[in-house]
Amino acid sequence: MRFFSDNAAPVCSQVLDALARVNVLDTAYDGDRWSQQLDGAFSDLFDTQVRALWVPSGTSANALALAALCPPHGSVVCHRDAHIQNDECGAPEFYTHGAKLLLADGPGAKLTPETAAAALDRIPNGVHWVQPHAISITNASEYGLVYTPDQVAAISEVAKPRGLGLHMDGARFANAVAHLDCAPGDVTWRAGVDVLSFGFVKNGGMSAEALVFFKPELADATLYRRKRAGLLLSKGRYLAAQLLAMLEGDLWLANARAANEGARLLAEAAGERLVHPVEANEVFLKVSADEAASLRGLGFDFYDWAAGEVRLVTSWDQRAEDIAPLAEAIAKL
Amino acid sequence: MRFFSDNAAPVCSQVLDALARVNVLDTAYDGDRWSQQLDGAFSDLFDTQVRALWVPSGTSANALALAALCPPHGSVVCHRDAHIQNDECGAPEFYTHGAKLLLADGPGAKLTPETAAAALDRIPNGVHWVQPHAISITNASEYGLVYTPDQVAAISEVAKPRGLGLHMDGARFANAVAHLDCAPGDVTWRAGVDVLSFGFVKNGGMSAEALVFFKPELADATLYRRKRAGLLLSKGRYLAAQLLAMLEGDLWLANARAANEGARLLAEAAGERLVHPVEANEVFLKVSADEAASLRGLGFDFYDWAAGEVRLVTSWDQRAEDIAPLAEAIAKL
Amino acid sequence: MRFFSDNAAPVCSQVLDALARVNVLDTAYDGDRWSQQLDGAFSDLFDTQVRALWVPSGTSANALALAALCPPHGSVVCHRDAHIQNDECGAPEFYTHGAKLLLADGPGAKLTPETAAAALDRIPNGVHWVQPHAISITNASEYGLVYTPDQVAAISEVAKPRGLGLHMDGARFANAVAHLDCAPGDVTWRAGVDVLSFGFVKNGGMSAEALVFFKPELADATLYRRKRAGLLLSKGRYLAAQLLAMLEGDLWLANARAANEGARLLAEAAGERLVHPVEANEVFLKVSADEAASLRGLGFDFYDWAAGEVRLVTSWDQRAEDIAPLAEAIAKL
Amino acid sequence: MRFFSDNAAPVCSQVLDALARVNVLDTAYDGDRWSQQLDGAFSDLFDTQVRALWVPSGTSANALALAALCPPHGSVVCHRDAHIQNDECGAPEFYTHGAKLLLADGPGAKLTPETAAAALDRIPNGVHWVQPHAISITNASEYGLVYTPDQVAAISEVAKPRGLGLHMDGARFANAVAHLDCAPGDVTWRAGVDVLSFGFVKNGGMSAEALVFFKPELADATLYRRKRAGLLLSKGRYLAAQLLAMLEGDLWLANARAANEGARLLAEAAGERLVHPVEANEVFLKVSADEAASLRGLGFDFYDWAAGEVRLVTSWDQRAEDIAPLAEAIAKL
């Protein structure tokens, strides 16, 4: 049983079915009838007028978002454990043409208004220093913690008076919303978010993420950047179809709830071993090397996060009975 | 009936079936069992040891290839009608960090050894001028003309003594090989090509192209560039599966033959109206604005290429009976 | 006697004296009292409010100007013989992060409204094509021809309705103004120029050029780009002093007049051999290889421009008696 | 009296004299007779074959050095207080096209082998992470501390087995060598340094720094990068002359000794107030805000470094009697 990554999970049948449904002649790139529906569908979901672009990966969504908010000579504040800093091989620097990430602290890989402000205040005003242009937060965070609407708004109150944009890396946005049980707009634009990387691939999609602009004008130059990066796939309808299938009947939310529930079951079994509260679909456990080996010996696969710490990720397709054996094994350690 | 672009055609059933077949748990990115087969499968096809990477678009394949061959302060010679110059919104400049394209001439959007050498010889040696590092040719060309192995080798003889790499943009490589009826290796590495952008999407694929390195060591840094560009999709097995399905039983060749046959039928009907010989799946016709309008009135869709000239593109899924109505309409003009 | 390049000429005594005058303790970078005078001094000269920055080279002035006018995904129309295209090793591409130069024609390396418009009209609207954001013209041109205020205004009338910026590469702007005998503002901002690279080094300066923004707000981000490129020298007062010395008593104009007069004398002697009218300080002559060799045998140094064509450049420090021997030798050919 | 920055000091008379001496006709760019002497002069100084290029600023020297050692998809380990990280407005990211700086710790803004290794070991091997390609150290450091040859060699022993290049930012290299009283080669190439940014401007120069390659082949591509960045000034002889004047009779060393001696005098007066040992020409003092105000009231100018801490920098032109008033004032606090 694999708890290594939600990227390893298969694709929802509804997504595969949608691919078959759009398998007809249509216009290339994003001129097709499905791509043309994205703005409307995401505007409905978020209850405000947005621009929504498909992109083939979360890394490209994040990098395009940052390039929309920050010039090459600028900088972006993010948590020092953020994916954009640690796991994207410099994609933000590539797409922004060399902007800098300014690293800030905060428990659970979440920025606080204080840590964000401290990072910003360290930058003197003047041409010798890369001036900040944006803050990027990850919801759910790298450690599976969720920013509430109030917490996002508090970050925004740091950003807005300084003229900074606010980006949310939502590779696991669905899991965050499932946890919060709020309207998607509450934890995004209503709380000050300008651009959202809305992840679907970890949540049952195949190869399409949504880049959602709550300031629609930010999308204009992004359309050129997307093309210029080779991200404007010629048969775009197969990406649009995935996103529309995920939105249909709130499949994205159902899938995220299932994954979160799996994590909850593991968390219950883990008790004192938990490194962080479990809010989304990631579980970080204190286990010794021997204990980790014994779990692996039982056929469970997962990631060694740090010395004496492992990461378990649950997926949309895992039911309670798929989780139970690992929960039991953890409880027995 | 649509003759606008082969990008508008649907996806092969074999490709869709392959997506279903790989829809199981596996490793993320390109660690899965299908991605791991690509080097072997393409090495078999080309009869030499290659590195083959999936990428989600032809533009990204071309741009990564050029970045592998040319430093930011260098230049690449290509035809002035090349896709990399005209239709990729500066992707080569983005991926190479600002290298220049040096434009050369040649009939049918094909370079000749003479025109390539002339473009190269215009660049003085010295730090004031962007020194050439590669030549890029397109096979089949923007006008549907095919470089023979001898013609490629003649370009290579211009490139190699000058220490230049040779890239082939093969967005319609399958159509070229179908026309040539040669081994894929004959018109690539045996003729001096270092990197091939091997297109599948126009030929029945969905979202996967192959970047084939005949100098395997060129792939090493490309792996980082692919990730850094957000092109390393997390569920890579769905891209690998497309490529493997296209190679299986030489589906890529059968599809290309079908598209070429459609163009041949149109060419037969067009007679004196042909602007270029028809060798692949593109047909350029001299038609007046009135004639174009009358064809459109009959329900045929196509691209106005220039004043008095239209482009028709046939696709893998068009059978003789799908082509016949347009052929007849052209003959009757 | 050297007619190879005005870069080879020495530095004016007034400039050297100015270096000595500012050789006292002052603030670093551009906070010193001389750098702080530049906006005022150039505003006076141009009879409008400008921002004027020192930079150490003409290439960096041009590249910063283009970066101020064009985003990485955009393009700039220039003459195919322009210095920014041919002689700066890709500096525009480096500073703009990969914008493209679109090449246009025109006699004497000067764009015309028609050739500029033709180059612009070739670019379809849409994300597949790098959209134009600026036009760059060179005054005096690569062939020593001068745009009149009316000619600049006519180019501006192509640029402005399309929302494009207008840059003037004025490496030999002084020579152009000396020829035109107009106010500097007449051939720049009054004719629609947004940014001027105002050259001083070829005209008796040592290591300082002025980047003059007629839209002052364009300077804001440029200050960051200048620093980020390592162009913000720490002892900036030695650059500011050069510029102020050149402006003092219109030394820049006197020097340019002297250089132009030298070229005029050569042009008189050359008669039918002239390839272009001589308006600034460059003279292009038709001479055979034998004739060129015989001139060189007499000790004259110059550049072979093309087959049967040589370029002679006169400098600020050459008096009539310095020019006479070459003029005589040409007349005798 | 100004103790704000050594950049505020004037230029040596020998440097100004040298400008006058080269004020004759010669070849443009770096083809002149003085630029051509640099390789030889610096090879003599370092007692090994080097390539030495003039550049107009320390920031550009550093950025070109890093671009020579690190590809766009790579990273460079440096101290978190390094100038390249904090004070160059992203110049390293601009010149490397987006490589990342990995920040490491160490007392006195100096890396230790342990802290450098720890930063390196945090980077997993694989395409998701920017792989390290170089280490950059600053000698003397941001806090005026000096790496000994043994300390540099120990860093090199971390770099070399991992295949990393080693860069030394020597904005105050002269001050470091003056302190060490060693041969310049001892603390550079003999200790494993591949590229040195050798600063002269803070030490009495005007606008020329030297970029010294101990692996001469690294200079080849740098020549293109220097041109492409607009750093190849057309009258290069005025930069070369500055460097040659500074080398003549070891003026660079005499100047640095003078500046160091000034700092030593201040350090003596400061006693327990010193934040760091004083080894070069920077003195960091613990003083209260009131004390700082009282020093400023006496006419001394300096930089507030942190709460309760000020930075004093001495310059090449300050004699003992210029230092004495501040030393006395500090002693009296």
Image (spheres, coloured by chain):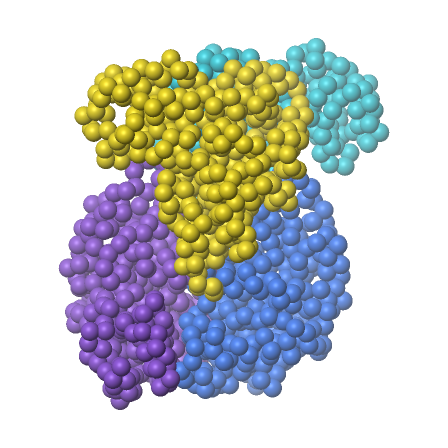
Chain colours: A blue, B purple, C yellow, D cyan
Give the left or right position of residue D272, taking residue D261 as reference. Answer: right
Which quadrant of the view contains residue B33? bottom left
Give the left or right position of residue A1, taking residue A155 as reference. Answer: left
Which quadrant of the view contains residue B136? bottom left
Task: Indicate the position of residue A27 as horizontal and vertical percent values.
Answer: 43, 77
What residue is shown at x 24% (from left), y 56% (from top)? B106
Give the left or right position of residue C187, taking residue C90 as reference. Answer: right
Task: Indicate the position of residue D202 as horizontal and vertical percent values.
Answer: 58, 24
Given residues B79 and A90, the one toward you in this image is B79
What residue is shown at x 76% (from left), y 30% (from top)? D286
Q: Quadrant of the C terminus of chain D?
A: top right
Give the left or right position of residue A215, taking residue B24 as reference. Answer: right
Q: In which quarter of the image is the N terminus of chain D?
A: top right
Task: Indicate the position of residue C140 as horizontal and vertical percent values.
Answer: 44, 35
Q: Height in image: D119 above or below C278?
A: below
Q: Height in image: D129 above or below B178?
A: above
The answer, for residue D203, to whether it is visible in the render is: no
Task: Indicate the position of residue A261 as horizontal and vertical percent values.
Answer: 63, 80
The answer, for residue B332, to whether it is visible in the render is: yes
What residue is shown at x 54% (from left), y 70% (from top)? A53
Given residues A203 and C3, the one toward you in this image is C3
Q: How many labels does the image show?
A: 0
Q: State the residue lying farthest toward the left.
A: B150
Given residues D126 and C106, the one toward you in this image is C106
